[in-house]
Amino acid sequence: MQRSQWYSHICRKGIVPILLLIACCLAPLGYAAEPIDVASTNDIAYEELKVFAEVLMHIKRQYIKEKSYKEIIQGGLHGLLQSLDPHSDFLDTESYRAMQEDTAGKFSGIGINIGLRDGFITIIAPIEDTPAFRAGLLAGDAIVEIDARKTQGMALPDVVRLLRGAKGEKVSLGVRREGEDTILKFEIIRDDIEVPSVKGGRIIRKGIGYVRITQFAVPTADSLQKALDKLKADGMQALVLDLRNNHGGLLKSAIDVSEKLLKKDDLIVTTRGRPGVHDEVQGKAAGDVHIVDIPMAVLVNGGSASASEIVAGAFQDHRRAILVGEKTYGKASVQSLMSLKADDKLAIRLTIAQYFTPKGRQIHEKGIDPDIVVEASPKDWQSLRMRRAHIENPELFTEAEKKKYEHVVDAQLDRAVDVLEGVKILQGK
């Protein structure tokens, strides 16, 4: 087909008006520096938009199920962002609201954090004291079915939408777990999920404090400061910081937490994006509080991801803490959440940079190796999490349930405490 014939064809099909509409919508938003010339052969973006518009029209007119332009285009936007990397995505109104709820630490659902790994929807970490936690879901479980619907090929926001719902509603999951030959089935009742990001602050042995961070949200640094102040008042001389199964959160929160336990101006993290767009930025320890006079151990495992790895990597590089446990998840990309000018109820989550530890280590898809390796099997981990939940929330469990787990040993925590006791002895000498 000659160019003149092609132009006449797409005019009859209504594709040119769609392209012109795209151009008109983008221009007032500041995205079109020059008007799109329909007759130009030099505008590469326009040439590719012709392909997009033709596919859109084929779907609209011939697909087996009738779809609105909104459904087609938003579905295309999901695919567009997901094709870049597993962590970029288009967020429709519901997904955007869910993301904002996550940041605030309150939502309704079953209580898990998920990601894509090897093409499967994978649990990064179940949130403690939630329906998912009590049902026995584990980090690393692959969710293959939700209410009998296969999840293979689903976008993350679609999965989140299926998992969340009103309190009291039931959802059925099919889960593939390492070491299991069959698909495990779970029926879970949704509930309101409110996640305090700092938990379990207490003295666990003479002079050794313990505190756990479950996620890095807006209030995390302030909550940690309150926990540290109480521990110091109780005589803390050393600290165990537990980041196991902490899926991450906000970059700023990770920096705000790290700086409290590092020297002023210590480098915490470096982010590097596309040159000239997102140049290198260094996050350093600021603020007025810098607790550097007590030894530290940090607990990590395969569920420790993203912001958790920023904190763990900074402490390890500065030799501020001894890392105990298992290799971390290995997510070192930085996403920016951008609401859209065309509709501020929509947004995109776009990977704009990768982060590097203070010594310049690139840990994306590699993870951080602990200084002292102490492994825990999935079965052991489930038991010790239940034991920890009984200690921190005794009112949620019966005496029979508490007795069932009272002899469970947290080998990773015990090893960290032993190390700190040794350090205290050496400091005394």
Image (cartoon, rainbow, N blue to C red):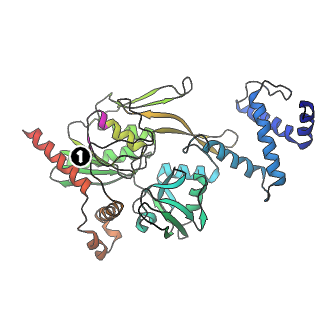
Quadrant showing the C terminus: top left
Residue labelled with disc 1: 239
Q: Is residue 130 left or right of residue 161?
A: left
Tell me the crowding category of disc 1: few under 14, some 14 to 19, or many 20 or more residues within 10 angstroms, Cα based.
Answer: many
The stretch in magenta equals 315-323
Q: Residue 417 location, x and y as percent?
A: 20, 50
Question: In the picture shown, does residue 10 fall above or below 281?
Answer: below
Quadrant showing the N terminus: top right
Q: Nearer the viewer, residue 53 or 68?
A: 53
- Residue 294 on the magenta span: no
Q: Nearer the viewer, residue 178 or 312?
A: 178
Q: Residue 19 location, x and y as percent?
A: 81, 37
Q: Nearer the viewer, residue 366 or 76?
A: 366
Question: In the picture shown, does residue 146 fall above or below 93?
Answer: below
Spot the residue most to the bottom: 400
Write the residue at 43% across / 68% down. Answer: 135
Q: Give, as a three-letter code, the residue at label 1.
A: Leu
Q: Residue 296 location, x and y as percent?
A: 24, 43
